[in-house]
């Protein structure tokens, strides 16, 4: 997982993980134990499921917006690599070749 300098994004990442685990546990329990369709608890379960799904969607939206603004594109296809600027890589390679000699050698 990536460390975030923005505490709001870090909080949303933690909440997303926690809410996904809670949703999975709730749905698993619902299907393993079963529910009576007319039970009062069925309405509470449906409300809890809807609330967790809403919270998950909200956190995903916030994290997605943040990632779109801050992360570099991860395209690795030939066209996106050929359109990129590679001049700094060449300069780095030339600098290493013509770099200073280590002391004690000569």
Image: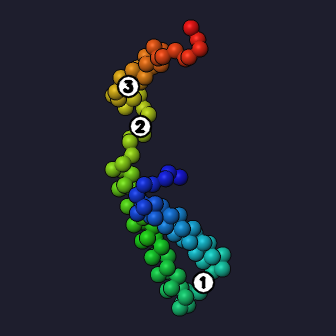
Which residue position holds label 2? 75
The CA span between labels 2 and 1 is 47 Å
Residue placed furthest toward the top: 106
Kind of element beneath mark 3: helix
Residue placed furthest toward the right: 32
Ranked by sequence position, the earlier of labels 1 and 3 is: 1
Report if residue 86 is visible in the image: no
Ranked by sequence position, the earlier of labels 2 and 1 is: 1
Q: Is residue 21 above or below residue 45?
A: above
Q: Residue at x 50, y 64 (%)?
A: 14
The x, y position of residue 86, in whole percent, is: 37, 25
Q: Residue at x 36, y 48 (%)?
A: 70
As drawn, the label of residue 51 is none
Which residue position holds label 3? 88
Tell me if label 1 and label 3 are in contact, CB under 8 Å.
Answer: no
Q: Is residue 43 above or below residue 59?
A: below
Which residue position holds label 1? 35
Kind of element beneath mark 1: loop
The x, y position of residue 103, in whole percent, is: 56, 17
Report if residue 18 is visible in the image: yes
Kind of element beneath mark 2: loop
């Amino acid at each position: 997982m990536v460390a975030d300098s923005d505490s709001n994004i870090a909080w949303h990442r933690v909440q997303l993980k926690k809410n996904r685990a809670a949703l999975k546990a709730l749905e698993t329990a619902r299907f393993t134990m079963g529910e009576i369709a007319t039970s009062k608890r069925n309405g509470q379960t449906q409300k809890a499921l809807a609330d967790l799904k809403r919270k998950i969607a909200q956190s995903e939206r916030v994290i997605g917006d943040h990632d779109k603004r801050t992360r570099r594109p991860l395209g690795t296809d030939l066209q996106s690599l050929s359109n990129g600027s590679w001049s700094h890589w060449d300069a780095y390679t030339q600098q290493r070749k013509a770099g200073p000699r280590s002391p004690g050698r000569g």
